Amino acid sequence: MAGITILDVARAAGVSTSTVSNLLNGRTGRMLPETRERVESTIKELGYRPNRAARQLRTGKPQVIGLVVPSVGNPYWGALARYLEAAALTEGYHVLLCNSERDPARERQYVDELVSDGIRGIVLCSSLPSLEHVSGLLDDGLRLVAFDRTAQADDPVGLVNVSVDNAVGAELMGEHLVSLGHRRIAFLSGAIRSVNRTERFEGFLRALERAGIARPDVVTWPGSSGAEGAFGDVEAAELGRVAATELLAGPNPPTAIFAVNDMTAIGVCRAVRDAGMEVGRDVSVAGFDDIVLAELYSPRLTTVRQPMKEMAAAAFRALHGPDEGPASQGTSLLFRPELVVRDSTAAVVA
Amino acid sequence: MAGITILDVARAAGVSTSTVSNLLNGRTGRMLPETRERVESTIKELGYRPNRAARQLRTGKPQVIGLVVPSVGNPYWGALARYLEAAALTEGYHVLLCNSERDPARERQYVDELVSDGIRGIVLCSSLPSLEHVSGLLDDGLRLVAFDRTAQADDPVGLVNVSVDNAVGAELMGEHLVSLGHRRIAFLSGAIRSVNRTERFEGFLRALERAGIARPDVVTWPGSSGAEGAFGDVEAAELGRVAATELLAGPNPPTAIFAVNDMTAIGVCRAVRDAGMEVGRDVSVAGFDDIVLAELYSPRLTTVRQPMKEMAAAAFRALHGPDEGPASQGTSLLFRPELVVRDSTAAVVA
DNA sequence: GGCTCCCGGTGTAACGATGCACTGACCATA
DNA sequence: TATGGTCAGTGCATCGTTACACCGGGAGCC
């Protein structure tokens, strides 16, 4: 226990607690340089660290931001958590971790709890398409960043969305597959109810249309109702496997399959192999996100990278930075995705 | 902002703040049932939630535990973070997330910071073999759980270690490989400097000795000095690939390779494939940990499962529960590992 | 009647940091 | 010598909760 208070510092430096506090909070305008130095060195000597609880009690603003994700067990959210924490650390902020397990009630409860604990900045990775239920909190001064989501028409004012440009990313992948000579390309996704899935699908269609390819096979899968698998991941992969198996067994199967994310793509790869074919040679498979697994998988997965580190940093800035002008409605910070070509896609064999 | 204080409740219920506080803290001994019910219903009605900052300021004990991991981007630590948070939630605790990035200085700084923020319970996933540097903090009443580590001779008093029984796990895998008819089995690991690697190695040797197999090939790899890869993961896999490539190209190559963890095993699988062989048929490959990838990888990886959920719950109990008798030295909570046989291991072909 | 005991609470001083409103000293001007 | 104006810092109420020390009153006992 540190146990050293601002009073200890004040006494040791021969000033009042107010002066120490003023220094700590940058109010150094009217302060003799020598006083300032004396206090500063006293702080160092004693190893004084301000008590966050007391500070929060007084100011109402804790040096903590909340992060609500479906599950940090999922590598995608794990990566976000890692980079967000790193960004927060640079400003002396800590990150409180909350796993919603994709349960909307739990997600809402977490947000309420964080708010009533005085936390003023939350990064929310919601599984809900609408975020209306938080608009009241936003009016009360909460800073909310919705991650992996783009602005919607009915978004509450003040909400900042941070996301990769899904449409552009999917378009890049579409172009890539087309350039490899593929003409029969399937888009494989779970139920397209979330915003970013819709965007990915539309970007993909754009690329194909430009190449003069008719509307491709689109396979969506309802997904199991209710609770998803342990991480939601395993289920995504299973979905890819089941759907791709059916697709490949059908008439006129595609030569390439673009899965809505890497997990699903991994399931697709398994299905391809189960069907006695080789990924990359017989069928090209592509994913989206570029999670760690994509690089490690076999074959290494062609995918679309999200610049996680930059996105996390931007999310933190949006929470912490100065209020950016008038709170506008429908703010989206869109990041440029990057096509990462690896071994799971190849030129179509004639 | 909730904004409702204990005073509001007290006034509305016609009692003093002390009574409300007493109820909140379970001191209901001398309290009329009717008073109690009145206060309780008032709390509900008003939606009162105690202010954590004030509570902490007063008691010195925040309802927060710290979690220091190398990186939550790594699925293994991500899983721990997820389950630990779930366990903490059941008691109303929150989890503060810290990524040490395997930097000992940063790890130490995080612990100091958490402690001086008043946090009294920390789960530390250290990359350091010795934890002497925290013994001072333990004397001051900090509860510290070292995760994925077993007790050492020079451990500070009061430290609780939580880990899977690595020796037993490796022994199970050794037996499994032997039972499949393998006789030339390699153990593949990065530098065996950490405690659990040593234990895995010894357990593995035990199984082989019992089967009358001479000391097997053991391949360890120094690993790059300095910073590891983005997650430490990618490097582990790379290590497996490089080492296995060399091993398979040598004279009298093993028919089975037991990698020290799943990430390394994945790298081994790649090497096997690169050498024109098939995992499971030509060479058996086994890992340890049973991270999500193990199930998803192709082939599905035979590995040793750590009961993460139970381990996380135990770690939390060790932090939060009552002081267990006299603080002893060398406390280890060891969990039973489970052999998970999948597709990457098979009977040796004659 | 006087005494103690217990019941069912209540009063209030902290916990540590903050920041507004203030002050004493000094200088310049009228 | 008043008057005003900086300058450099200080005094103190305050945030919401806790828990120790207290208190009024009724019961029981001699």
Image (cartoon, coloured by chain):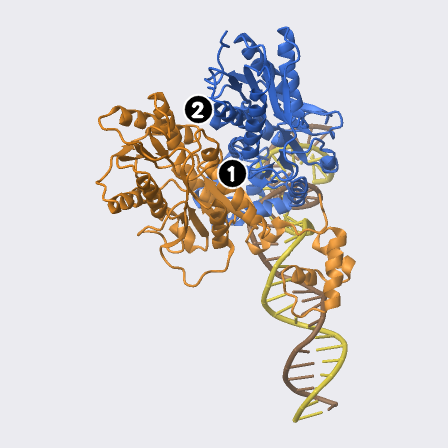
Chain colours: A orange, B blue, C yellow, D brown
Upstream in sequence: badge 1 or badge 2: 1
Question: Which type of secondary structure does the marked residue at label 2 adopt?
Answer: loop
Percent across and percent down for residue B87 are: 53, 31
Q: How many marks?
A: 2
The answer to the question of whether label 1 and label 2 lie on touching residues, with beta carbons closer than 8 A, is: no
Observer-nearest of A247 and B306: A247
Which of the numbered marks, if any, corresponds to residue B298?
2
**Is residue B313 in view from this perspective?**
no
Q: Chain of mark 2?
A: B
- The residue tagged 1 is B35
At horizontal 31% and vertical 28% (from top left) the residue drawn is A244
Q: Position of residue A153 (x, y in %)?
A: 30, 52
Residues B38 and B186: in front is B186
Residue at x 58%, y 10% (from the top left corner): B183
Q: Position of residue A94 (x, y in %)?
A: 57, 46
Mark 1: amino acid: Thr
Q: Quadrant of the N terminus of chain A?
A: top right
Q: Which quadrant of the figure has residue A11? A: bottom right
Q: Residues within 10 Å of mark 2 (few under 14, many from 20)?
A: many
Does residue B131 appear in the picture of this structure?
yes
Q: Can marks 1 and 2 be said to lie on one chain?
A: yes
Front of the two marks 1 and 2: 2
x 45%, y 55%: residue? A141
Amino acid type indicated by mark 2: Ser
